[in-house]
Image (cartoon, helix red, strand yellow):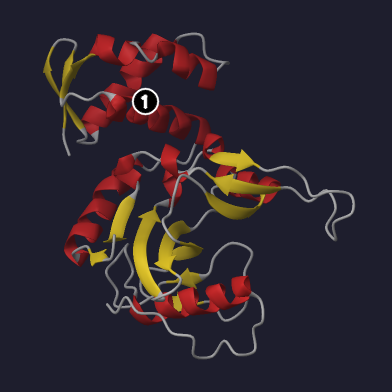
Amino acid sequence: MDLQMYFKGIDNYHSGAQQARVFTETWVARNLYCPRCGNENIVHFKNNRPVADFYCEKCKNEYELKSKSGGLGEKVNDGAYDTMIARITGNQNPDFLFMGYQKQSLTVKDLVIVPKHFFIPSMIEKRRPLSATARRAGWTGCNILINTIPKQGFIKIIEDGRIVEKEKVLLQMSRCSKLEILNVEARGWLLDVLECVNLIPMQEFSLDDVYRFEAVLAAKHPQNHNVKPKIRQQLQYLRDKGFLEFTQRGKYRKIY
């Protein structure tokens, strides 16, 4: 994997955004394996598609690339808000690739994959509509709040200019696939409780430690009035999937 990107072939593009799209997508097509099955490369779709940029010819999984100059930060710009929400709730999302690159040296700094089942509507921030004088007046974009994605689904392929071992990436992808849930409401509960567990600093913790997030979870899920039973249900699910283990009654240990 060569972290260097090239300007070749972008002479016909005048805007910085178009040029960045060309050299980042070209880099992915030339360098990136399929994080799902390990196939040696993923292929750029021939025509622009509203959902994905790349696909794997072997396992048929699809990917969308989002890139930005510098570090990834806490959020990444995406397209239309309503379209993104419809994709998440309709389970039409591809896996997302988030790339941070150094503009001056044209090198890849960070590359992360987030599996499609780690997205829920609360991770999508609605931007202000374009003004009445804009060419697309009223159009409303969105940001993906990548800082809200649980670390189990934030899988690093390149970290600060260092390539992560392919086998490690494939293992993490395989493991996090155990948390795939199609129902968006159920997925939201699971990911929200998982993030609460991640925020507990100790590897071993108690049920009361998670109950301290009751008010936060109740605010995120106002239609549910039985938060504590729901917390216990999600902890049971995480145990069954191998992300937690029970050590004794009301006590848990994280498995990473």
Q: Quadrant of the C terminus?
A: top left
* Left or right: 193 in relation to 161: right
Image position, residue 186 (x, y; %): 46, 30
Horizontal arrangement in the rendering, residue 146 relative to residue 241 (left or right): right
**Image quadrant assignment for residue 192:** top left
- Type of the residue with mark 1: Val
Residue sitting at 62 percent across and 44 percent down? 85
Label 1: few (<14), some (14–19) or many (≥20) C-alpha neighbours in 10 Å: many
- Please tell me which residue lies in front, 249 or 142: 142
* 128 left or right, relative to 147: right
Along the viewing direction, whichever of 136 and 15 lies nearer the viewer: 15
The part of the image, by quadrant, that contains residue 41 is bottom left
Which residue appears at 50% of the width and 47% of the height? 75
Q: Position of residue 197 (x, y in %)?
A: 29, 26
Residue highlighted by disc 1: 193
In the rendering, at what x and y percent does residue 40 appear? 29, 78
Secondary structure at badge 1 equals helix
Spot occupied by residue 224 in the image (x, y as percentages of width and height): 52, 14
Q: Is 208 rendered above or below residue 15?
A: above
